[in-house]
Image (spheres, rainbow, N blue to C red):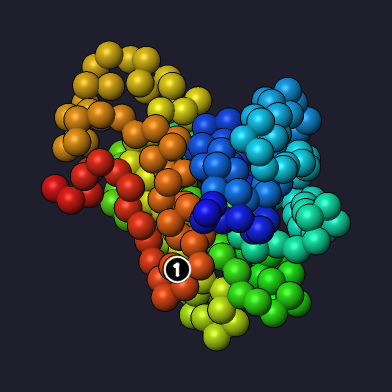
Amino acid sequence: MKRLGGKVAIITGSNRGIGKGIALAFAKEGCKVVVNNYKEDNEGKKVVEEIKKLGSDAIFVKADVSKEKDMKNLVKKAVGKFGKLDIMVNNAGILVFGTVLDLTEKDWDKQIDVNLKGTFLGTKYAVEQMKKQGKGGRIINISSIAGLVGFPGISAYCASKGAVTEFTREVALDHAADGITVNAINPGVIQTDMTKGMLDDKATKENLLGNTPVGRVGKPEDIGNAAVFLALDESSFITGHNLVVDGGWTAR
Ligand code: NAD
């Protein structure tokens, strides 16, 4: 028995990286998936094909998470194709480097628009749809351990993820009685395009591994498996939680 059989999920930024890892983990469990990126590209279409090969169904919908019109349309397209929405994963994110002295106002706005406003808009339109359906739902926000502890040189990113962490707790309270659980996953260092530059640099990689007690970098599947757990019907008593998946980084 597939554990997410009959469910429908939207995963933002799922053409590659962690989002793709979550999309494939959901599809393996029988979930129908709406794959998303802010632009049309082959990566997204390939993820749709991979999902179909796994025996599930998927569509690709272009939407920029920082644009309200796009996010309304994303939910509308998901419901139009699959009839409902059970799970929303707000995963799309960017990493803007810089201390407060380096960052421009434009850098700051871009970082907050995608990581925080995008999570707000995805949550807003998913909750609206889930309430209409009246059967509860699951919101899963991809935060970061940078939303729990400080990391030098990425002040706007830390601020965006700290806010996602707290936003998750607040929305969980507002919608607990609706049967909608709202949780975050706080990944440590995961091998994706976002971290490629750091992991390609030998000294930086050694430093990151030195801070990761399990002694390896995380894989997108590690986050996919955690997201499946939070999406299960059996996880209905878990809400407002920040699930750290970091190989022990923040346990030290
Ligand atoms: P990634 O760069 O490989 O993937 C991010 C995805 O988001 C890409 O597909 C990108 O096109 C998409 N995206 C960016 N802006 C968008 C927008 N405006 N609208 C729609 N899609 C957009 O990075 P990743 O490592 O897979 O990151 C996924 C999430 O995990 C992010 O929120 C990131 O902050 C978080 N995270 C990553 C790590 C890590 O070590 N890789 C650690 C902690 C948290």
Say which of 30 and 25 sits in front.
Answer: 30
Q: Which residue is mark 1?
A: 234
Name the residue nearer the viewer: 184 or 233. Answer: 233
Residue 113 percent coordinates (x, y):
62, 50
Residue 178, horizontal then vertical, whole percent: 60, 82
Q: Quadrant of residue 214?
A: top left
* Quarter of image, res 137: bottom right
Label count reads: 1
Residue at the far front in the pictured view: 1
Which residue is depicted at the point 46% across and 28% down?
A: 192
Which residue is pictured at 25% across the width and 41% down the height? Answer: 247
Residue 1: where, in percent of width, then height? 52, 54
Residue 219 position within the rendered picture, expressed as x and y whole percent measured from the top left: 39, 32
Q: Is residue 188 left or right of residue 68?
A: left
Q: Compare residues 230 and 213 and report the one nearer the observer.
A: 230
Residue at horizontal 16 percent and vertical 37 percent from the top: 213
Is 15 on the left-hand or right-hand side of 245?
A: right
Q: Amino acid at mark 1?
A: Glu
Residue 245 showing in the rendered view: yes
The answer to whether residue 144 of the structure is visible from this angle is no
* Residue 28 relative to residue 78: left or right: left
